[in-house]
Amino acid sequence: MTIALPAAPAAAPLLHQPPHAFPRHPHGSRSRVLLSSVFGPYACDDEYGSRRLNPMELYHNQVTRVQRSFSLRMFHRSWGLMLIQANIEAPCTLLDFPTRERFIEELRSQRYDIVGLGAIIPNLAKVRHMCDLIREHQPQATIVVGGHVANYPDLDEIVDADHIVRGEGVEWMRRYLGEATDRPIVHPRVLSGFSSRTMGINLTEKPGDVAAALIPSVGCPLGCNFCATSAMFGGKGACIHFYQTGDELFEVMCGLERDLAVRSFFVMDENFLLHRKRALRLLELMREHGKAWSLYIFASANILRAYEIEQIVGLGISWVWMGLEGKDAAYTKLRDADTRALVRTLQSHGIRVLGSSIIGMENHTLDNIDEAIDYAVEHDTEFHQFMLYTPIPGTPLYREHQKNGTMLPRGEYEEADIHGQLRFNYRHAHLPPGVEGGLLVRAFERDFAVNGPSVVRIARTVLQGWRRYKDCADARIRERFRWESRDLAVTYAGALWAARQHFKRTNARLAERISRLLGDLKREFGWRTRLAAPLVGRYLLSMLRREENRLSRGWTMEPATFYEHNDSALAQMASRIGNSLAPGGAAP
Ligand code: B12
Ligand code: SF4
């Protein structure tokens, strides 16, 4: 089945401003620019809006939240800011994940013409505070605020910024600096995650093991009513392509492969396969050049169904993040789709699935919520994200609640708590106020109790893929499955052994299931696995126990701070050092 879509606009809708009103910085491309994400620490409760429940992590925040020592811990850089930095000619410094003190130090020690902050709505209070800090320490600087926080109503009255940028930031910044807007987009060289950890072990980050982040487009033309990213980049019928064709994308991927020594890509595109022509051309090129790449993508169910499984496998798709939303959800992307059958099919080809379900949909009541949770859990996806149905400013769902008068008054909650894991910012038609956070935890816990730790589910599906494709006639496909299965015989065997011991007393049914899977691995890989499972397993079990203790003591993780300069900023720094070293130059 194919879904007809209105044509997407070729370029970003710029700020709802007529072109003649577009602002321009007086120093143009000579302006010194600082870009910064909001400050940490993040995983703690503080007066600036950090919340222990809302760490700067993806999986631990909203996917493996209750998996304790089995939870996947990992950070992701601020790709939007990196993309802007890589695509302006003005000297630009990026401060990613600073502490408040580090941000102040930067403002005290360096002079900037423009300070750009990128943030999302839960971090609104930090943006306000950072604007005040900029005014205090660099009164001459122009303050630009971008990212999802820009959609917050009346933001200009809440934060002291000069420009609030809604939508795509590269083109805005280029125009603001008076630079050409039609230059091709340079893709930043960045690995998709860092400081990864699970079962008490820091995962290796040697070249080739971590995927590169790849950002082909932003936005999604399907325009589901609650979707902030679709709304941000034009809503229904619109999206913005940084790389329009399969050829352009292939070239970018070859560059990332070469420079970062990667063979897998985390494709940060809301609905990658929706752009069929581009995807199929990419497939052609991957075949032609023998690329055994792995792609981790976001895709909606009906778009996936519009492809042959051979095409999906041929494209190297090995992880799919798919919205399941909820039983009887009326979204076009799910219409007539049997998502449970679809997940099974994907898994039988070694494709791992991150299912995403919503708690608190319009039809949810205290009477049917368990049925809704069971439906989600039955998918038995490798990862399962549960989020609260939340009207986010800018979305059609938000407008609808506003119209109906069902949004809570601002004073009744803090934006820092509207991160999708705790509470609603509106009155739900059926659920009594305050129950939602508990229902969400119930969903996570049921999924964990029934399906077990994600590492076990991943081992199961990777094994299915290996069995199916290890002797595939196509060497390119065979090679990818060999690479993806490289840890099955030893590391995963050990992880299963440890997991079985861990659950032996508390969840016998799960322990039995893990035991059967370990048996399958042993049959497949023979003596190596028989030997490795208890050896590696004992070590992992001890690490797991240590991690449990750490977590019980309240241990959390914070990302490192990154401080990076683009070429123009580096050149400026070099010339300043040169001047100060030259005879008669100022002492440093
Ligand atoms: C990666 C990601 C994360 C990473 C964050 C890493 C980081 N360094 O910040 C992690 C996993 C940690 C994360 C966590 C959370 N996230 Co998040 N995340 C994303 C995700 C998937 C991708 C963002 C991205 O890189 N996109 C690609 C880049 C190119 O786009 P961009 O960031 O939007 O940047 C463009 C523009 O926004 C703009 N821009 C951005 N910054 C700036 C700055 C300036 C000065 C200018 C001019 C322009 C500009 O220009 C950029 C280029 O076009 C988005 C969903 C999505 N598909 O976008 C959600 C998303 C941003 N997250 C969201 C949320 C709610 C959260 C969480 C609260 C948890 C949650 N429940 O999901 C936590 C908060 C953590 C915390 N303590 O702050 C929401 C934000 C909703 C909103 N309206 O505020 C989103 C939209 C997901 C969603 N649909 O709900 N997240
Ligand atoms: S399909 Fe997914 S990305 Fe697209 S609008 Fe719907 S929720 Fe957003």
Image (tube, rainbow, N blue to C red):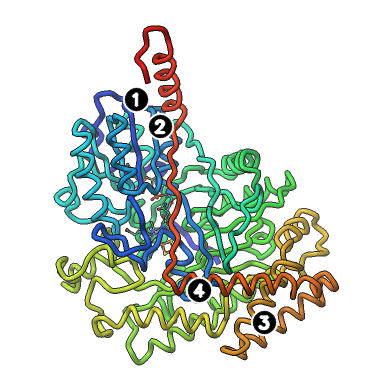
How packed mark 2 is, by other alpha carbons closer than 10 Å (few <14, some 14-19, many 20 or more), is many
In the rendered view, would you say 158 is above or below 95?
below
Indicate yes or no: mark 1 CB to ligand 1 under 8 Å. no
Distance in Å between CA atoms under marks 2 and 1: 8 Å
First in residue order: circle 4 vs circle 3? 3
Q: Please tell me in which quadrant of the rendered image residue 494 appears.
A: bottom right
Measure the C-alpha gap from mark 3 to mark 1.
Answer: 59 Å
Q: What residue type is labelled 2?
A: Ile
Q: Residues within 10 Å of mark 4 (few under 14, many from 20)?
A: few
Q: Residue at x 65, y 70 (%)?
A: 540
Query: Badges 2 and 1: C-beta atoms under 8 Å apart?
Result: yes
Rendering quarter of residue 273:
bottom right
Q: Where is residue 585 in the image (x, y as percent from the top left)?
A: 37, 11
Label 3: how many Cα within 10 Å (few below 14, some 14–19, many 20+): many
Looking at the image, is mark 3 or mark 1 earlier in the sequence?
1
Residue under label 2, please give it: 88
Contact between marks 2 and 4 (CB within 8 A): the answer is: no
Quarter of the figure that contains the N terminus: bottom right
Q: Mark 1 points at which residue?
A: 29
Looking at the picture, how far across and down is residue 321, in whole percent? Answer: 52, 65
Q: Is residue 371 visible?
A: yes
Q: Name the residue under label 4.
A: 549
Q: Say whether marks 3 and 2 touch (CB < 8 Å).
A: no
Quadrant the C terminus occupies: top left
Q: Give the structural element (helix, strand or loop) at label 3.
A: helix
Which residue position is annotated with label 3? 514
Q: What residue type is labelled 1?
A: Ser
**CA–CA distance between discs 4 and 3?**
24 Å
